[in-house]
Amino acid sequence: MRLSKITTRTGDTGSTGLADGTRLGKDHARIAVLGSVDELNSQLGVLLVEELPSDIRVALLQIQNDLFDLGGALALPTQDTFSQNKIAWLDEQIAHYNADLPPLREFILPGGSRAGALCHVARTVARRAERDLVVLSQNDPVPQHALPYLNRLSDLLFVLSRCINRIQAASETLWRRNK
């Protein structure tokens, strides 16, 4: 049993505990990254409620597990436990799902089907987590492979949003330059 007591009251004064017992203010950059990664994982959970092809569902569940691992690695700043093979897997997924998509000749606006739009929202949360991680990395150690992972993940979510929209016959809306 990992968590038998949910309410500890130890955070009532504005600090929170890391996995190694260290306490940080809830405004600390590490806590911001942890929150963004958790929010991203939750956003993927919302996406998974939608009707999705089984292979995309399996990939998103793997990503949720990887994000949980990333949160664990961020909560143990003295141990770099986040594996590089997760980046290679994302690269494989990007290549696989992008292979059958038509090339983009213009930027697209987030939208399409509900699931496609939710995937775009997850992509933007991944980008925020990436930015938060950059801020943390300026003063504190971060897992070596975390930044490339979040960068590739946002790319994959963009590609998946296009795939989902294509499968669900939802057209992409092209950005129109104001003239």
Image (cartoon, rainbow, N blue to C red):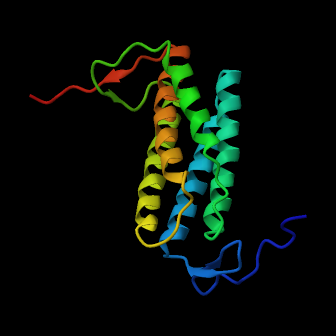
> Residue 27: horizontal and vertical position, in percent?
49, 76
Is residue 82 left or right of 131 when viewed as pictured?
right
Q: Residue at x 56, y 49 (%)?
A: 40
Q: Quadrant of the N terminus?
A: bottom right
> Residue 121: horizontal and vertical position, in percent?
48, 41
> Residue 100: horizontal and vertical position, in percent?
50, 12
Residue 13 in sight: yes
Q: Residue at x 53, y 57 (%)?
A: 36
Q: As drawn, which residue projects farthest toward the left?
A: 179
Q: Quadrant of the C terminus?
A: top left
The residue nearer to you, when weighing 93 against 78, is: 78
Is residue 40 left or right of 5 when viewed as pictured?
left
Is residue 154 left or right of 74 when viewed as pictured?
left
Residue 108 sits in quarter: top left
Asked if residue 169 is positioned above or below residue 38 in the image, the reply reads: above
Residue 45 sits in quarter: top right
Residue 51 in sight: no
Is residue 60 left or right of 150 when viewed as pictured?
right
> Residue 167: horizontal and vertical position, in percent?
55, 15
Q: Residue at x 70, y 38 (%)?
A: 61
Q: As drawn, which residue projects farthest toward the bottom?
A: 13
Q: Residue at x 58, y 27 (%)?
A: 93
Asked if residue 153 is positioned above or below residue 20 in the image, the reply reads: above
The residue nearer to you, when weighing 113 against 40, is: 40
Asked if residue 71 is positioned above or below residue 162 in the image, the reply reads: below
Q: As drawn, which residue projects farthest toward the right?
A: 1
The residue nearer to you, when weighing 139 against 135, is: 139
